[in-house]
Amino acid sequence: MTTESAIEGLLFAMGDAVPAKDLAQALQIPDEEVRDAAERLARNLEESERGIRLIRLGDSYQLGSCPNCFEALIRLAAHPKKPALTNVMLETLTIIAYRQPVTKMEISKIRGVSSDHAVNRLVEYGLVCEAGRLDAPGRPILLKTTEEFLRRFGLSSAEDLPDPGAEKMAELEEEAEEESAEQENQVSVNV
């Protein structure tokens, strides 16, 4: 049995993403040999036009369906299992993805409104998880994106996120500050 075959069998049996170091330990080979074999397996699966692909998620690997199978999978399953994300959830997820690790308070400050519900739903959907606690009063929870986020958005790592550019980021931050100032003015007028 080749290393590629062994990796394919292990990943099929596990179902979820498996870190390269765990595959190396199971196969009793160096991590680098696992990475090389995984790359060969990925090329072989794609070149032979198989229905499965090897997906790299950070330093982990998982088997998944070929993107061309998506429509047929949806018809077979009758209903997609992953719920649609609202604009509020997408906005919140974007902030987390680009600013991770980040606290709920920081997210709410950027958005100008409470983001608790959106964050809770993103955690429930497995797109966001706890990344520890900030060393500050109250020890707020830090949030980051998950492997499921990478999987759903077709990324290998958070570094693969598109770069919005410095100008666009400055523009967005300015808009957020203006919206926040407007809301503060409305609150003081209403009081």
Image (cartoon, helix red, strand yellow):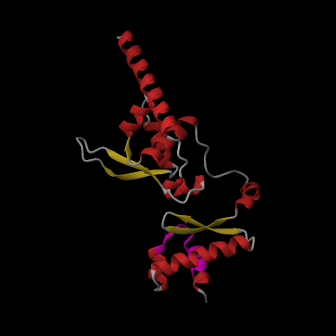
Give the mark count. Answer: 0
Indicate left or right for 37 with 109 as reference.
Answer: right
Task: Tell me the quadrant of the picture where the N terminus can be found.
Answer: bottom right
Question: Quick one: 80 or 179, which is closer to the camera?
Answer: 179
Instruction: State which quadrant residue 109 falls in.
Output: top left
Q: Is residue 36 above or below residue 70?
A: below
Task: Tell me the quadrant of the picture where the C terminus can be found.
Answer: top left
Instruction: Name which residue lies at 74% across and 61% down.
Output: 69
**Residue 26, horizontal then vertical, whole percent:** 47, 82
Check residue 13 for magenta coloring: yes
Indicate left or right for 173 with 43 as reference.
Answer: left
**Residue 145, horizontal then vertical, whole percent:** 47, 51
Check residue 117 for magenta coloring: no
Instruction: Name which residue lies at 33% across and 46% down.
Output: 141
Q: Is residue 55 above or below residue 9?
A: above
Instruction: Name which residue lies at 51% across and 41% down.
Output: 165
**Residue 118, horizontal then vertical, whole percent:** 48, 39
The outermost residue toward the bottom is 1
**Residue 40, horizontal then vertical, whole percent:** 62, 77
Instruction: Name which residue lies at 60% across and 87% down.
Output: 2
Indicate left or right for 52 with 138 as reference.
Answer: right
What secondary structure prevails in the magenta region?
helix
Q: Which residues are magenta?
A: 7-20
Q: Is residue 87 above or below residue 27?
A: above
The outermost residue toward the left is 137
Question: Quick one: 117 or 176, which is closer to the camera?
Answer: 176
